[in-house]
Image: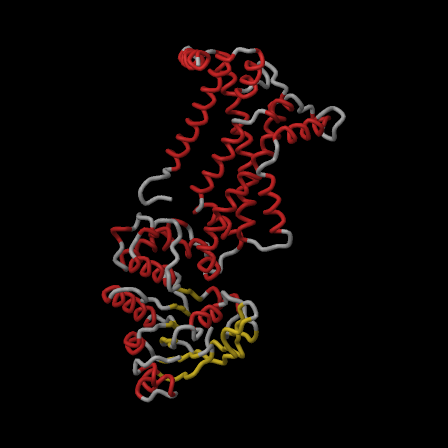
Amino acid sequence: MNDLWNGIQQAIWLTLTLDADLVEISLRSLRVTLSALFVSCLIALPLAAILAVRRFKYRRLIISTLNALMGLPPVVVGLIVYILLSRSGPFGVLGLLFSTHAMVIAQVIIITPLITSIAHQSLRELWSEYHDLLISMNTSKWQRIKTLLWDGRRALMTASLAGFGRAIGEVGAIMIVGGNIDHATRVLTTAISLETSKGDFALALALGFVLIALALAVNFTTHWLGRTEREGRW
Amino acid sequence: MFPMTVCDLSVKVRQKHIIGPINLTINEGGITVLMGPNGAGKTTLLKALHGIIRLANGQVTFATPAKTAQEQQSFVFQSPIMLRRSVLENLAYPLMINGQDKQSAMERARTWATKIGLSAHMDRPAPFLSGGEKQKIALARALITSPKLLFLDEPSASLDGAATVEIEALLSEAQSTGTTIIMSTHNIGQARRMASSVLFMKDGQIDAHSAANAFFDTPPTQDAQKFIAGDIVI
């Protein structure tokens, strides 16, 4: 209980004094996570719309696989990305291992199936609502996909936030591929892990509270910008 | 575009025969009203004519190429499907997917919103309006592209008298400006007011097809006679 109280006090203190290390780690956490989220959304959202609108061979298999990959173990992803990016691996020549780029790659692999599956679920429902209308209007496949992505944007925001939540709290994969190097690849979750192993529970808790606050702030901001939960809106 | 020729048209759903074989010719102008008991196949025939459900057999041909004919048709569904957008954006949608620039599409949409008495609701989300207002938007959205052929599936089902009068006025105006209309209705009074010819359907077949006056004065079949008299046709 004492550690918890100390943690809260230290979190407040670190935040109020804008501790340089804390700011650096927090900004890196945000940068890595938002970069991964951006790349992931570029892949996941159009893919979800295509899966909702188009009927093709192996479609069901792809959907089932994506659903299964939602529970992908991050440590395993980290290990695979590590092997691929290590000097002896196929992409070793790129020199990405133990960099924030490697962390972004790992997070993209982890959150893309999650965002795709949630987005697909929403867009599938929207497509069943719009199907007859858009077919009767003689729209092209591209126009249907664009319409679904635009009209389903608020549901897609929720899917993206789920991806953000998973990415910002992720530790296993980024610890392996990033290496938790001070002033280079250390982020909030890996710092918490390190401080806990050192026995500095108060600092670990303080970082944890900052992480929670950061996640909440991003969620609230996104909801506010997206004007969700307001009367007459979706 | 006309005549529209229907040759041996039949529709199956999951191997179950729904309508057909149907042979029919629709000439330019006028309002053809589809009547018949529930389950007669009116909606299926409308959708088959418009090309939004697959034919098991037969074909629908026009004097113009199929693609051109498809572009000159519109469809209004029994339950109006509203895009999750404002009234204006719903009205402008068919213009914009046909390549019209946003500004002129919105300008035309504004004119139509005023015409259907929804100028005060232009920026409100269309799905949150009343059933009558949504049906007017659906009809205006179908007419905004000045189609040569308009299909309507029970356009005033579940609407009150005032809303029905407004819908019928819009249809009469569309017809007078050169739109050929094919609509289904259960409302015998509406059929008497609107129809220039009547198609009476039963058990997926056309039981009678004649000019409206002749149909109502001397119903050509026993079932049509019972239907007009208000008897139950099984």
Residue sitting at 61 percent across and 30 percent down? A74
Q: Residue furthest right?
A: A88
In x, y percent, where is residue B16?
54, 71
B225 lies left or right of A119: left
Relative to B17, say whether A209 is above or below: above
Residue B30 vs residue A96, the one in the foreground: A96
A106 lies left or right of A84: left
Residue sitting at 56 percent across and 35 percent down? A111
Please tell me how many numbered marks the rendered image carries. 0
Relative to B74, say whether B32 is above or below: below
Residue sitting at 57 percent across and 24 percent down? A171
Q: Residue furthest left?
A: B162
Relative to B176, say whether A109 is above or below: above
Residue sitting at 57 percent across and 74 percent down? B57
Q: Quadrant of residue A173?
A: top right
In x, y percent, where is residue B94?
42, 57
Q: Quadrant of residue B92?
A: bottom left
